[in-house]
Amino acid sequence: MATMLVHPSLFPQLLRASFVMNTERRYSIILERSAEVLLNNALMTQVEAFWDANDARYFGLRIEDEHSAHARVMVTDELPDDESE
């Protein structure tokens, strides 16, 4: 299965576009290869601040449990060979 990397500056907008905005919705950002939790139980404003601070380091992979009150955003810090050129 191919993975589509999402530029960090677009990821918060994709989150908003994918879901009905809910002020109670929480997000955790998880580094996929190690399962390290980079941001836990965060509001959208905290997710946006995370991306602003880390947009050159992490790339969004996918969103899990997107329809629940607590979505998991899986990220990577490794670029595939075809994207790093």
Image (cartoon, grey):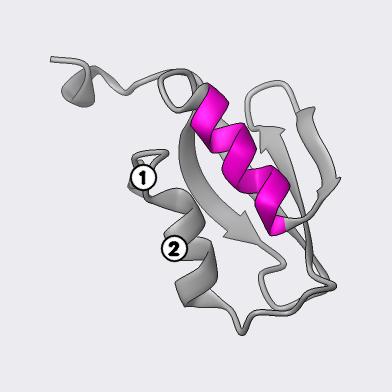
Q: Looking at numbered disc 1 in the image, what kind of residue is underneath it?
A: Val
- Say left or right for 52 vs 39: left
Q: Which residues are magenta?
A: 44-53
Image coords of residue 61 (percent x, y): 48, 44
Give whichever of 32, 52 is nearer the camera.
Answer: 52
- Residue positioned most to the left: 85
Work out whether 18 lies above or below 48.
below
The label nearer to you, 1 versus 2, is: 2
Work out whether 54 lies above or below 2.
above
Labels 1 and 2 touching (C-beta < 8 A): yes
Q: Is-magenta flag for residue 45? A: yes
Q: Disc 2 marks which residue?
A: 14
Residue at x 52%, y 70% (from the top left corner): 16
Helix, strand or loop under label 2 = helix
- Say left or right for 66 vs 17: right
User: In the drawing, what numbered circle is on residue 6?
Assistant: 1
**Most common SS among magenta residues:** helix
User: Where's the C terminus, which quadrant?
Assistant: top left
Work out whether 73 lies above or below 23.
above
Work out whether 5 lies above or below 20.
above
Image coords of residue 36 (percent x, y): 78, 24
